[in-house]
Image (spheres, helix red, strand yellow):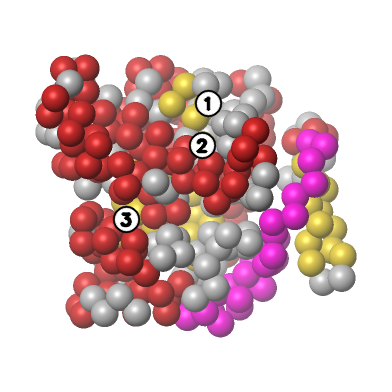
Amino acid sequence: MTARTVPPDWRPVISRETGRYHLAFRGRDISSVVGEFTDVDTMLGQAAATGVDRLVLSPWITLVPVEADPPTAREICEVQNAALAALAAAHPEQLSAVGVVALQAPELAARQITELVTGYGLAGAEIPASVGGRYLGDDFFLPFWEAAEQAGGLVFIHPTTRGFGVPALDQYYLWNSVGNPMETAIAAAHMAMAGVLERYPRLRVVLAHGGGALPVVRGRLRRAFAVRPEARARLTIGPDAALRRFYYDTVTHDHDLLADLVGYAGAGQVLLGTDRPFDMGTDDPVGEIRALGLGTDEELLLGGTAARLLGTPGA
């Protein structure tokens, strides 16, 4: 970000100490960055060492400015989106990227995602799982979802709440290991049961961390749909059909869970993820996929699904 256009409180302070990044942002020290965070050539080299030859860049989710007023948020988005577009254009064979939108102002966010795809040439946008206490199935966000479908923009959902304010999650790193996957499950279930994916059938939404806890609650969503009228108020296709409309990355850290996810959603809905450069990322994303023994479906997870979503060679 540049000092000319981004307010000081929205600029992270980045330094290196004993070979590791030290990151501070808005009064908080961030200790979870364990890989390259800013230099694209180094990032590509680190990815290549794990067998990954193309990256999809997304902004650090904390820099998605949903807490800013809309004019400030627009400026912050423009700086990041222009920078991401320049990086992707400079490395067309190795990089794709998703940008940022001001989701707290859905009409603005609708214009922005259209501009991301048609103007900046980016694949779509990264958004948080909730904004100001509203989850993504809320009608408040419908202008954004409609525009995302019309523009053909990919939407990547990443959690942000740091544990919902539950004191127990403040301990033992549970805000990340447990809180983050729970938030993704809430956001995705809310979208599914509110009928967002049914209303916008061409919408393409990727869930971080293998969908978080969403696959674990699918049976309860199915049962609620069968026995409770309020669970059927906005959805007609049923929870399983809705959940299979999402795309999921492979960052589950569990062989059996990943295998079950592929079996449930289908290989064409699952794509390689790394969660780099953070400590909860995977060290061997390709090896984890190969260990599943998927046969010809393996190539979908290793690149085919992503290529189709991104419109890159190999689709």
Task: Report the side of 234 relative to 20 (left or right).
Answer: left
Relative to 29, is 311 on the left or the right?
Answer: left
Q: Residue at x 58, y 73 (%)?
A: 44
Instruction: Give the image location of residue 14, x and y in percent.
Output: 81, 54
Quadrant where the C terminus is found in the figure: bottom left
Q: Position of residue 16 (x, y in %)?
A: 84, 63
Of the image marks 3 and 2, the number of the one nearer the N terminus:
2
* Mark 2 and mark 1: Cα distance apart in space: 7 Å
Residue 309, numbered circle: 3
Q: Amino acid at mark 3?
A: Leu
* SS at mark 3 in the image: helix
Q: Is residue 302 depicted above or below 38 in this figure?
A: below
Indicate the amino acid at tag 1.
Answer: Val
Q: Which residue is mark 2?
A: 128
Q: Nearer the viewer, residue 126 or 110?
A: 126
Magenta-drawn segment: 26-53
* 132 within the magenta span: no
Residue 220 appears in the picture as rendered: yes
